[in-house]
Structures are given as structure tokens and as C-alpha cells.
Amino acid sequence: MEEEKEDIQNQTEEIQENNEIEESETKEDFEQKYNELKNEYLRVFADFENSKKRLEKDKFQALEYAYEKFAKDLLPVIDALQNAKEVSKENPAILEGITLTLENLIKTLSKYGIEEIDTQGDFDPNLHDCIMQMPNAELEDGKIAQVMQKGYKYKERTLRPAMVAIVKN
């Protein structure tokens, strides 16, 4: 009987040890699964945050450059007023009206970031289109000698490059 008791006690201890081993393995499995899911969550959350930032940036740029097409459409109007100003030199009243209209239009465009491209000095292929080369003893090679058509930019983007002639001696 004592032997049976001892066998039962040994079996009970064995079962308890097995349960402890299974329990520790299960706990390790749960911890591993938890860590995997936590890492996956953090990656998905980071992707979401990056997408959100990218959308905000795209939205800001869309708003920032919303006037660009409108500004391009106004450039022929500015050209027409500048040409009319040149032609109307014989009639001072018309010349004054055209000059004031042109100045107001340019001032309004400037308020919204639309400005004339500087054509003084060196040729810049990002801002100017060279449509011809001409000799000029007074200027160095590569300098702008004459402006055929004014160019305009909206903030940092070129709406229309200035058409210029550059010096080539």
C-alpha cells in the first residue's frame, strides 16, 4: 500500500512538472505572439502617420499653387496691356489709363506671389529662353542683351520663361 501511495505521489509530481513546463511554454508563446502583434501594430501605425503627413503636404502644395493656372491665363492680358501702352504713346489720356490698369494688375498679381522674372545680368536657363544671340561690345558673353517677352514666376515656379537675346561676341 505504501508502494502504491509512493507511485501515486510520483505520478502526481510528474503531472505537476509537465503542467508547469506546458504553462511556461504557453506563457512564452503568448509573450512571443504579443510582441509580434505589438511590432506589427507599431509598423501599421507608423505607416498611417506617414500617409497622413504625406496627404497634409500634398494638400498644402495643392492650395499653395492653386493660382498657378489662373496666373498663366492672365499673362496674355499683361502682354496685351504692355503692347497697348507702347502703341498709345501719341494719346496721353489713353496711355495714362493703360499704364494705371497695368500697374494695378501687376500690383495685385504681386500680392499673390506672381512676379516678373528679373532679366538684368546673366542668362539663367531655368528662368530665360534664349531665342537669339547677338554681338555687343559693351557687354560680356552670356549677358542678356535684349528682352523679347517678359517672363513670370509664381512663388518659386516659372510660369513662363523670359524670351531673351544674349551676347555672343
Image (cartoon, rainbow, N blue to C red):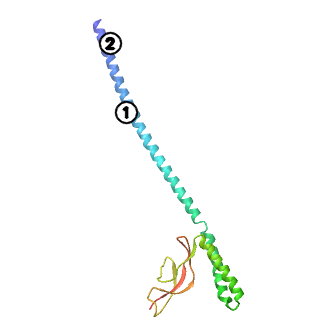
Q: Where is residue 50 in the image (x, y as percent from the top left)?
A: 49, 53
Farthest left residue in view: 3
Farthest bottom residue in view: 137
Please say if 76 is above or below 19. Answer: below
Tag 2 residue: 8
Tell me which amino acid carries mark 2: Ile
Q: How many neighbours does mark 2 have within 10 angstroms: few (below 14), some (14-19), or many (20 or more)?
A: few
Q: How many neighbours does mark 1 have within 10 angstroms: few (below 14), some (14-19), or many (20 or more)?
A: few
Q: Where is residue 164 in the image (x, y as percent from the top left)?
A: 53, 84
Which numbered circle lies on residue 28?
1
Depth order, front residue of 99/39: 99
Question: Do labels 2 and 1 touch, CB within 8 Å?
Answer: no
Label 1, secondary structure: give it. Answer: helix
Q: Which of marks 2 and 1 is nearer the N terminus?
A: 2
Q: Quadrant of residue 56?
A: bottom right
Of the residues tagged 2 and 1, which is closer to the observer?
Answer: 1
Q: In this view, does 11 lie to the left or right of 34?
A: left
Q: Position of residue 16 (x, y in %)?
A: 34, 20
Depth order, front residue of 126/95: 95
- Residue at horizontal 51 percent and vertical 55 percent from the top: 53
Q: In this view, does 105 lie to the left or right of 145?
A: right
Q: Is residue 165 left or right of residue 22?
A: right
